[in-house]
Image: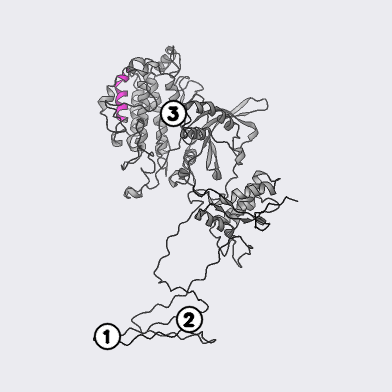
Amino acid sequence: MPPKAVPGAGAPPNMVPASHYNATQRPPQKKNLFFRTYDAWVAVNRPNWKTAERNRTRDFIWWDNFLFRQPFETAWTANNGVVPPWDSNVVPVNPRALAEKNNAHARFNSRRQTRTNPTGAVPVNPPPNVGPVQNAPPSPLPPLPLPPRHNPAQPAVPIAPPIAGPAPARPAAVVAPSIVNRPDPAPARPAAVVAPPIVNRPDSAPARPTEAKSPYKDQYPFYYPFMPPPPWDEDPDSTELRPPPHLSKRKWEEEQRGDRYILQNIERVTRRWLRTALGKLDEEESTWQGSRFLGSGTYGSTGLWVKTDAQKNIIQSMVAKEATPSLASWIQPSEWRQQRPREITMHVILDNARDEDTNPFPNIIQHYGYRLMMRHRRFRLYLEYCSRGNLAHALRDRTTVGWKNGQRHEDYKDAPPECFIWYVLAELVEACIILEQGNANHLRENWQPLVHADFHNANVFLKPRESSSNGIPKSWPHIILADYGRMFYEINTDPSAPFEERDNPHEYVFNSDFDGYNNYPSELGFSTHKTRITGKTDVFSIGAIAWQMMAGKFDRDVPILAGGRAPAKEAIPKEVIEKDPNLRGYSRQLRKLIAHCLQFTPADRPGILAMREAIRRVQNDPNHPGSQRVEIRMAYDRNMGGDPLANPPGH
């Protein structure tokens, strides 16, 4: 026999007493007003229930009955700090099953639940008896009958009173006073139309004109139409999830804890996160374990999970990227595509176009699946592991202390060879051609061009090459484009549509203008400009990456004029870039191409297919230092010890 709840003072034994919260702050979510008292009651009265059973039953109760939710809706609107009491008889002796919870949620989302049909049953005949519900408001009165419309062109026909039964006493008619000394009496009006008597309506309101429109009513349309419809996959239990490291780091930074505090605690948070399950629904969890934390960004953390056999040998590896968008991003329609978070859909689109035999996409990161956790507002992506890290780390490893002085070009003596930079350019261009047309050689039918819109060297990954092939040394890594969190395709593609009706550019720019983010083109900055974001936005970023490799700079640096002016702010003459002392030792063709890519106006930049042609002309020239001749590449491979991105001697 379960223990009894402790009733509040003056409350019936089966009533969970009211509680309070701080009404000076923003009130909790409507359902949380119920959840907080429910969790406390169930912990005492259903101690043997598991967490998942408690949560399923709680969700069923909330979604099952419209009238049950009404007191909490009212309390949430009033925000007076009072959480209404509720009847504990709604909690069953045995927990609700998953199918029951999903059924209740489907009825909740059907919009059929009303005061007269509180459970949303179909058909509604008669309305189900849900029993007494605490604080349920009274049912509204039926609408008043409207008088018949009168056509002035026809004589009015008085309506006779009802015959059956004695008519109720009517108040005496008010007689208008005589009109005396009125030389211009008003013309006689047609006889008034007598409305039928209204019986047993002492508080009747005047009839409304039929032309009146209903006033606007705020609604909460959850789930949103751009989200996947329920039932959703079962989410991991809250106790099985851990905050990804980027959440803790961001929280500590907002609290101004300081770098020392963050460094001391981030490792502990990271270890706890790596101990969570992989979460991939089609994999046996017991064979996978978190191995290494790889990095984090604003809204995501990545880690390496490995699969082992019975002898604990690693037989497979996979990167799990866990994204936790902010609430504002989660409910933003432009962050969704095809009823999935936009980043997931970008991977799915590329997966559907990829063909390992005829269209393999060697420069697009492999995607192995995803896990969408709707109730927790997060998701995981499962991606291939690029063991050599990203290009930003590779370039950073080649820096010297001398770069802190003003003679960077004199200190950067071990820059990558020109043939390798042309190779990287060619690989990045091939990746962007796939985004542009869905196929390496032609435009795929019904393809919508994709724009990466977050193209920088930290999103360019390096994967080891198994062997030398096509004249490319084994030490030269595969170049892989990754991180599709800002990638998009346009929704409104009508070129004649007004700017206000178009999603591009204002849905895809950054939240603010960026000072210092000079590897991004100007059109990605938050402003009132009307420049569309297209594939030429990615062309600028390709040029910035190549310039960073050539000049020995990295991250956010691109050519800057005297006074701090940068391409993100205004145009820079091509001659300034071509004559940059940081680029000494590279051919004029390479410097000219980079200057062309870094132009302020997108129309002045080359198209992605034109870049491919320019690169191929150089690589096919046997006398050019960027030639793809095997002898040139292999000679460099022998003379420099192989890896063009390895730390130079003495570093």
User: In the rendering, at what x and y percent does residue 428 appear?
Assistant: 40, 29
Does 75 appear above or below 295? below
Does 257 appear above or below 113? above
Q: Nearest to the eye among marks 2 and 3: give it.
A: 2
Amino acid identity at mark 2: Pro
On the image, which quarter does residue 596 sit in? top left
Q: Nearer the viewer, residue 208 or 548?
A: 208
Does 413 appear above or below 175? above
Label 1 with label 3: CB-CB less than 8 Å = no
How far apart are labels 1 and 3 at the CA level?
89 Å
Q: Nearer the viewer, residue 145 or 651?
A: 145
On the image, which quarter does residue 373 sit in? top right
Amino acid identity at mark 3: Ala
Q: Nearer the viewer, residue 39 or 487?
A: 39
Question: Residue at the spot x=45%, y=73% of the render?
Answer: 205
Question: Residue at the spot x=53%, y=78% of the render?
Answer: 200
Would you name the residue on which mark 1 appears?
185
Q: Earlier in the sequence, mark 1 or mark 2?
A: 1
Q: Nearer the viewer, residue 512 or 253?
A: 253
User: In the rendering, at what x and y percent does residue 532 appear?
Assistant: 33, 41
User: Is disc 2 surrounded by few (<14), some (14 to 19) or many (20+) residues within 10 Å?
Assistant: few
How far apart are labels 2 and 3 at the CA level?
79 Å
Would you name the residue on which mark 3 appears?
458
Q: Nearest to the eye among marks 1 and 2: give it.
A: 1
Question: Residue at the spot x=30%, y=87% of the render?
Answer: 179
Does the magenta run of residues contain 590? Answer: yes
Question: Which quarter of the rendered picture does the C terminus lie within?
Answer: top left
Q: Is residue 572 left or right of residue 13?
A: left
Would you name the residue on which mark 2 appears?
197
Q: Nearest to the eye among marks 1 and 3: give it.
A: 1
